[in-house]
Image: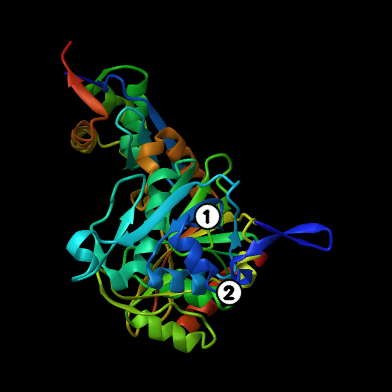
Amino acid sequence: MHARVGGSDLPVILSELPSNSVARKLAADGLILQVGPFSFRLISPIDLVAEGVTAMYADYEVLDESRFVDYTVTITHGRGLRRWVGRQAVFEFDGAEPFIPLPVDHAFPLLEWSMNWCISMHAHHYLLLHSAVIEREGCAVIMPAPPGSGKSTLCAGLVNRGWRLLSDELALISLIDATITPLGRPISLKNQSIEIIRAFVPDAVFSQVVHDTSKGSVSLLKAPREHLLRINEIARPRWVIFPQYEAGAIPQLSARSKASSMLELGRNSFNYVVLGLKGFEILSKVIDASDCYDFQYSQLNDAVAVFDELVSRRGRD
Amino acid sequence: MLYRIRKGCRLHWACWDDVYVVFEELSGQTHQMDPVKAFLLHLLNDGAQELDALVTEFASVPEFADSVRISALLTKAMDELCTHGLVEATYR
């Protein structure tokens, strides 16, 4: 979708749409958004989805109907009795329901998880790592880690202290040259991390906190607008860092072997096995280009200092 | 008994700091290898060999001069390679 301004076409940003237009589009034929390299048609009659999309995707480009859509994600009401009693939200994709229905107040997190699922199950033109990725001076840090390791908290802290958000959840690695394409989605925070980041970034925009999900309490943090303006700037892998939050720990960056890091990244990939030899070759390139570390931390300010030092040290090396 | 690279296996290598990573195309599995196992696979890549012949090859490397120790080391390494499905034992 483009607006004609001074004789040239400018992309339409979601926040520029008339009020109620987002909810109307979502409830009708859908709202088509450009999200990183993917286009999503989002369809939902559920008010909580409209609220979440309006708040979290305000700075994303809205595409018109003539554009190709990669994924159509529908979050709709449960059928029959579940529309009225114990109301549910259901994710539909290509006529299937890949997830079990959730309580209707989980509808917006369900949309986010569904979008992640679409990419991780289908975007095999990238090597997909379950990992946060941030960038500074063209160099990317890949941070794979299991749930509870503090990956998203660290990512949220760093992208509000000088690092650019490429992704909180999925590293999109080129199968040609191992560069990383930004995805630029909201950051999913859970439980205590929500209050930690509220305190660390007082002017941050959060979605409504949803309690009692399978991951506990969940809230999304809006991606910084200035990072979305640079969404087409790829980055090169430079560091692979496995973060681990440990209460009371002093920050400690410990070198780890490239071979074990490669195997661990492979285990954290959604499609390394699917890609076969190409996956091995690309992952080898990522590791070749990267210094690999384990990182233990407890305080975000300490972590920021350690990551900043990585960049300055690279300049001296 | 002869050891050989398992039929159909195609190995691809990466190496950092004397630690090897090998991707086996047929199974799609990736394995981490120490230099001993990596060298064994390298030797077997040229054709099937008996354990004694492999011990002799290793003995030519100064770090592996103790042939009793090498024999035990190679037996264990070969068992692991067989378990990973990279090597198979066969009879003449």
In this view of the protein, can residue B19 be seen by the observer? no
Considering depth in this image, is A45 or B43 the residue closer to the camera?
A45
Name the spot of residue A77 as percent of width and height, x first.
30, 63
What's the amino acid at mark 1? Ser
Q: Which residue is mark 2?
A: A308
Where is A260 relative to B63, above or below?
Answer: below
Name the spot of residue A120 as percent of width and height, x first.
40, 50
Q: Closer to the N terminus: mark 1 or mark 2? A: 1
What's the amino acid at mark 2? Asp
Name the spot of residue A56 as percent of width and height, x first.
50, 71
Name the spot of residue A208 as percent of width and height, x first.
40, 79
How are the residues colored?
Answer: rainbow
Q: Is residue A40 left or right of residue A177?
A: left
Q: Which residue is mark 1?
A: A290
Q: SS of the residue at dot 2?
A: helix
Tell me the quadrant of the picture where the C terminus of chain A can be found: bottom right
Q: SS of the residue at dot 1?
A: loop
Place residue A229 in its image quadrant.
bottom right
Considering depth in this image, is A77 or A260 the residue closer to the camera?
A77
Could you classify mark 1 by the number of other residues whose Cα lies within 10 Å: few (under 14), some (14-19), or many (20 or more)?
Answer: many
Could you classify mark 2 by the number of other residues whose Cα lies within 10 Å: few (under 14), some (14-19), or many (20 or more)?
Answer: some
**Mark 2 falls within which chain?**
A
Q: Is residue B92 left or right of residue A70?
A: left
Q: Is residue A15 left or right of residue B77?
A: right
Place residue B27 in its image quadrant.
top left
